[in-house]
Image (cartoon, rainbow, N blue to C red):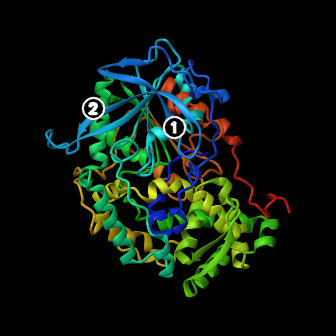
Amino acid sequence: MALKASLGMGLLAALLLPVAGARQQDPAKSASPLAVASSARSLPPHSTAANGAAAVPAKPATWRLGRLTLTACELAQPHSGLSTPAWCAKFPVPENRADPRSRRIELNLAVLRSSSPVADPDMLVFLAGGPGQAATESARIIAPVFGPLLAHHHVLLLDQRGTGGSNALDCPEHDEAQAADAGTSFDVVTVRRAALDCLATVSRHADPRYYTTTAAVQDLEDVRRALGGPSFDLVGVSYGTRMAQQYLRAFPDSVRSMVLDSVVPNSLVLGESFASDLEAALHALFSRCTAEPACARQFGDPQQTLTQLRDALRANPHLVTYRDPQTYQSSQQMLDEDLLASVVRMFSYTPATAALLPLSIDSAAHGDVGPLLGQAKILSGDLTELAGSGMQYSVICSEDADLYRPRPQDADTLLGTHLVDALKTICSVWPKGTRPVDFHAPLVSAKPSLLLAGQYDPVTPPRYAQEVAGHLADARVLVLRGQAHSVMAAGCAPELIKQFIQKLDPKGLDASCLDRLQPTPIFLNFNGALP
């Protein structure tokens, strides 16, 4: 499994990737970043779940923390038989923050309890990505980062409103067959119909105008006060970094420190730069190949091959047959330029799958689409939670879509303008909330901050972290060599995060251990990187 943090991936899956409609296994929980293993350190000391046995709840079965009474619980992890012991509660808030008498919704929260009899007074908070991912579903896969910190800290996992157990805005599944029969995975009519179907579904229990980052910021502050008012150490990944910055601006006295992984600047208009950022990441990857004699001999110029394949599919989208890597049964899929773009973008999110791209593209160009679509089938499984996320639409339509500007320079990129066009279509029918006047202004703060970036991140490149750090008086940016999106579990990054939380000295960190990280060698065949 891998850390969930797929900024914009759900939108791409929903709009451009019929494969992602199949309900299957986790990937980034697999289409995000790095593969990470579960760690016994993520479990409270009373648990025996680390060796596969059922966890034994602590006695007593309730725990009073501030004004909240939490109950011993198990956080089930999607698409696995695993769970993580925690302490859970429901927290009611008004749906409309401006009207305390409005409909009440319940937020789902969990606390991973420290192994110390007397934990440190500050509390760690994990802010999940997406937008649309649920923090409580990340408990086990964030274990390598938070496990060591549980020795002295409690960890709060709060499902942001509209996700997980917090009145989730789940859309109905799309009719993928109709999209395939239409000969294309994107058209205005199909996207608009899907958006209206989703709106009709979520409107039965929610008003989508009130599922924004700003409303979630107030939710988090109310939860903090109910927990007894601890200072928060914010740990955000991808979209969660937007949430962290907005919370720190609104409630600076509530924050002790901030860790931002795969940083989204406040100035960023979500979706607008996806095409150009992907293009830059692919160029860096393919340049590595052309600079390595063995790779260049094997694949020539992968960028040119990809462009030729895209142009061929633009002229002739067609039904292809490949073997499903999970069921081993023959599957059919409409292959067109949008599906190709979506699959390539998914591959670029992790170092391991990016290393397969030149080989997979070359195979597809020679008529064997099995490697490309087979891996995509595995990767797309984790995106299903985002592909049907009305919360994602509420965030982007309220906070970003009205700021889209024409970008003719993107027309000939792999993604082109289709994603932004689709978002505009969705937001033309989706109810919109409000955003503060300074929402997109840079965050100015002196709070100790550690910012992490992957060298080859296709959606939040390192320059975004540098932009945010430029307005933070006590911040440091670490760029992890060879990594892509969501990097907090890579190499010695968990140890550096631990040291940062303990000492609050980002500039004094000895980060030389990161020098051992290297790019994943590009695969020359399906046995690996060797000829």
| On screen, residue 98 above or below 272 | above
Image quarter of the C terminus:
bottom right
> Relative to 30, does residue 256 appear above or below in the rendering?
above
Give the secondary structure at mark 1.
strand
Mark 1 or mark 2: which is in front? 1
Indicate the amino acid at tag 1: Ala
Disc 1 versus disc 2: distance between alpha carbons? 25 Å
Total number of numbered labels?
A: 2
Q: Position of residue 445 (x, y in %)?
A: 35, 37
Picture residue at 51% right of the left edge, 77% below the top: 180
Q: Residue furthest bottom?
A: 315
Please report the residue visible at 82 percent of the width from the left and 59 percent of the height from the top.
Answer: 527
Residue 71 vertical placement versus 276 (above, below): above
Percent across and percent down for residue 377 are 61, 62
What residue sits right under mark 2 in the picture? 222
Does residue 79 appear left or right of residue 420 in this picture? right
Mark 1 closeness class: few <14, some 14–19, many ≥20 residues within 10 Å: some
